[in-house]
């Protein structure tokens, strides 16, 4: 698959199946800067690994302008993986290459999607990275690159300046001999890293910490929300656990580290519990949390996009602590998508328990998509609601 310029790529990119809106774009200035910096540094023709590509801009852009010897990509979110494949199909169709070739992952598309680890990075000479939100996420990536990539690897780590910090430089300097900030452009900057320190890259993820107030060991990979701690929204929702009724099948939707799933499974030993999230780091963390607490035989973990693999009316309870960000921006679309999904999969009489920031007007959507909704509690920051699925 080939395109002539980055513009050929960027103009076809969409975010689907992720939330789409006029103020949400499928690529940003950092994608462009990373690719143009790789060209300027003469990295064309090398073996590439791409990490953190949101919707395919880096992967398809590298294929277009860098003639990679090989191109491997890791995206934490399943929506990003699916968007990349859809955008690859669309780009090939626009270039009249043909749908059948574009839909076959591997040599025909020019890229292969892999988990973060040795297979992704072994022999990689150039790594393009959209910097993650957290320092822990960056450390897990830097560790993997230093351990597995080629000794002469160049890591190009880019981000929007407003989201970058000196702490990111400090993390990278622990794993690379040289970390050089490049000139900023369009409010983005690239950090050029060279000289990996594999001896410093002992694996330490997932991190496991004991949350004393729950008597629960919580495991977290670097990219997961809140790390191994108990976030305040989940804490508030858990105070209503005694009011929940037992279910045959309960789902922790947007599970993160799997705290809600673990506590529900403890409270209701007869229930089958599924912990599901868009994030690969989250489902790996939830699995590790279940294992650390002797609940692995009771909790199934699944990477999925808004319950897309669940049948209609197939579960009895859903626990939801939805995000109020899409990427780096505040946007209610992700939460609304999850509420709609919960309404679809709940059986009549099933319950959705939701905790959300008080400023978010989710109650009309809960009434519309699920059914009668009762406010069970409010704190200074959060609202907890119980919605009962109406008969179809």
Image: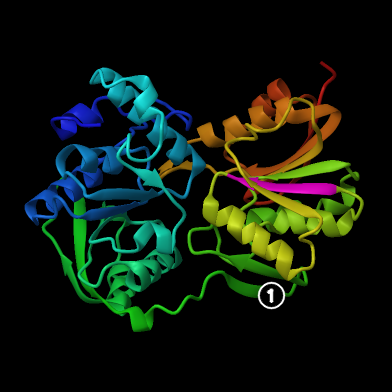
Would residue 272 be found to the left or right of residue 321 on screen? right
Q: Is residue 208 above or below residue 71?
A: below
Examine the structure image and report whether residue 187 is included in the region drawn in magenta.
no
Q: For the C terminus, which image quadrant? A: top right
Examine the structure image and report whether residue 275 is included in the region drawn in magenta.
yes
Image coordinates for residue 351, horizontal then vertical, percent: 82, 35
Which secondary structure dominates the residues rendered in magenta?
strand
Give the quadrant of residue 303.
Answer: top right
Image coordinates for residue 165, horizontal then vertical, percent: 30, 65
Would residue 322 be found to the left or right of residue 328 on screen? right
For residue 154, say whether it is visible: yes
Range drawn in magenta: 272-277
In the image, 357 versus 12, the foreground residue is 12
Residue displayed at 13% across by 61% down: 182
Residue that mark 1 sits on: 210
Give the quadrant of residue 99.
Answer: top left
In the image, 11 versus 124, the foreground residue is 124
């Amino acid at each position: 698959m080939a395109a002539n310029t980055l513009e050929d790529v960027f103009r076809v990119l969409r975010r689907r199946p992720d939330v789409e809106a006029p103020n949400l774009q499928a690529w940003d200035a950092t994608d462009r800067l990373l690719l143009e910096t790789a060209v300027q540094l003469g990295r064309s023709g090398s073996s590439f690994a791409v990490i953190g590509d949101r919707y395919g801009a880096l992967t398809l852009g590298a294929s277009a302008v860098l003639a990679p010897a090989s191109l491997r990509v890791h995206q934490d979110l399943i929506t990003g993986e699916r968007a990349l494949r859809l955008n690859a199909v669309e780009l090939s169709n626009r270039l009249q290459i043909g749908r059948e070739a574009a839909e076959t992952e591997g040599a025909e598309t020019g890229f292969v999607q892999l988990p973060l680890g040795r297979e992704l990075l072994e022999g990689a000479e150039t790594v393009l990275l959209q910097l993650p939100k957290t320092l822990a996420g960056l450390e897990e990536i830097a560790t993997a690159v230093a351990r597995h990539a080629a000794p002469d690897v160049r890591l190009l780590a880019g981000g929007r300046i407003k989201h970058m910090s000196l702490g990111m430089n400090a993390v990278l300097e622990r794993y690379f001999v040289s970390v050089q900030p490049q000139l900023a452009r369009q409010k983005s900057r690239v950090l050029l890293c060279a000289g990996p320190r594999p001896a410093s890259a002992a694996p330490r993820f997932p991190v496991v910490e004991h949350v004393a107030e729950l008597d629960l060991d919580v495991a977290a990979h670097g990219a997961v929300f809140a790390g191994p701690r108990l976030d305040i929204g989940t804490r508030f929702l858990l105070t209503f656990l005694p009011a929940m009724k037992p279910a045959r099948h309960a789902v922790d939707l947007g599970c993160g580290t799997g705290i809600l799933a673990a506590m529900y499974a403890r409270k209701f030993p007869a229930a089958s519990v599924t912990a599901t999230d868009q994030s690969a780091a989250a489902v790996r963390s939830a699995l590790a949390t279940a294992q650390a607490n002797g609940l692995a035989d009771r909790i199934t973990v699944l990477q999925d996009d808004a319950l897309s693999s669940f049948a209609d009316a197939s579960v009895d309870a859903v626990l939801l602590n939805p995000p109020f960000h899409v990427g780096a921006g505040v946007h209610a679309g992700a939460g609304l998508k999850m509420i709609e999904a919960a309404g679809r999969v709940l059986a009549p009489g099933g319950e959705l328990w939701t905790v959300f920031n008080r400023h978010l007007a989710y109650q009309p959507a809960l009434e519309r998509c699920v059914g009668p909704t009762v406010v069970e509690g409010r704190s200074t920051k959060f609202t907890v609601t119980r919605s009962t699925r109406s008969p179809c």
